[in-house]
Image: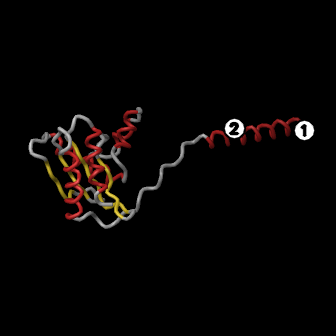
Amino acid sequence: MSRLSVMAGAICAALVFGSAAYAQQPAMPPAPPPIGVAVTTAQAKTAVAAAVANAKARPYLLVFAVVDPSGSLVYFEKMDGAPYGSTVLAIRKARTSATFERPTEAFFDQMESGHQYVTTLAPYLAASRGGVPLIVDGKLIGALGVSGSSNPAFDVAAAQAGADALK
């Protein structure tokens, strides 16, 4: 009988501690939006025009890239005098955001918190702020990547202004 009592106690303890460990798991992130019809050139130009207007309020010269959900370049614009190195980074930010269906800031935050695994996700991954998904009618139609400022908050602000122009 004592063996049965010990076994019952062990099972109860496993249930109690197992339940507590399960309850402490982090919440699942929200599901990504469904994929919609790819961003058109007209939509891309509208988004970039809004992003350029936002950028002109700041002292930085930026580069803008719009891609479709597969990461293929749809539209590109570079402000006169913008850094040449920002060209590739803007495209990478847009591709990262479209491919993984989330802002690139999510990957930046992961890197900052010590999760180096994100470097293995894709050859063109950009764990840098400034890439945002383009969502129209609740569906992902592409992404906008912005690069060129020394303050990533300005890249994000311009990219978000472009994304908001399509809502």
Task: Check whether the beta carbons of the residues at disc 2 and disc 1 lie within 8 A of each other.
Answer: no
Count neighbours of disc 2 (C-alpha within 10 A) and say few if under 14, some if 14 to 19, many if 20 or more: few
Q: Which mark is residue 50?
A: none
Horizontal placement of 139 versus 126: left or right?
right
Q: Residue at x 31, y 46 (%)?
A: 122
Quadrant housing residue 143:
bottom left
Quadrant housing residue 140:
bottom left
Q: Residue at x 41, y 35 (%)?
A: 115
Horizontal placement of 54 versus 104: left or right?
left
| On-image quarter of the N terminus | top right
Q: Secondary structure at mark 1?
A: loop
55 or 82: nearer the viewer: 55
Q: Secondary structure at mark 2?
A: helix
Count neighbours of disc 1 (C-alpha within 10 A) and say few if under 14, some if 14 to 19, many if 20 or more: few
On the image, the x and y values in percent for residue 32 come to 42, 56
On the image, the x and y values in percent for residue 131 come to 29, 47
Q: Give the residue type that dot 1 points to.
A: Met
CA gap between label 2 and label 1 equals 24 Å
Q: Which residue is under mark 2?
A: 17
Q: Give the residue type that dot 2 points to.
A: Phe
On the image, the x and y values in percent for residue 125 come to 29, 45
Residue lying furthest front: 57
Horizontal placement of 76 versus 32: left or right?
left
Which badge, 2 or 1, is on the more N-terminal residue? 1
Horizontal placement of 160 versus 91: left or right?
right
Q: Which residue is under mark 1?
A: 1
Q: Is residue 118 above or below residue 143?
A: above
| On-image quarter of the C terminus | bottom left
91 or 153: nearer the viewer: 153
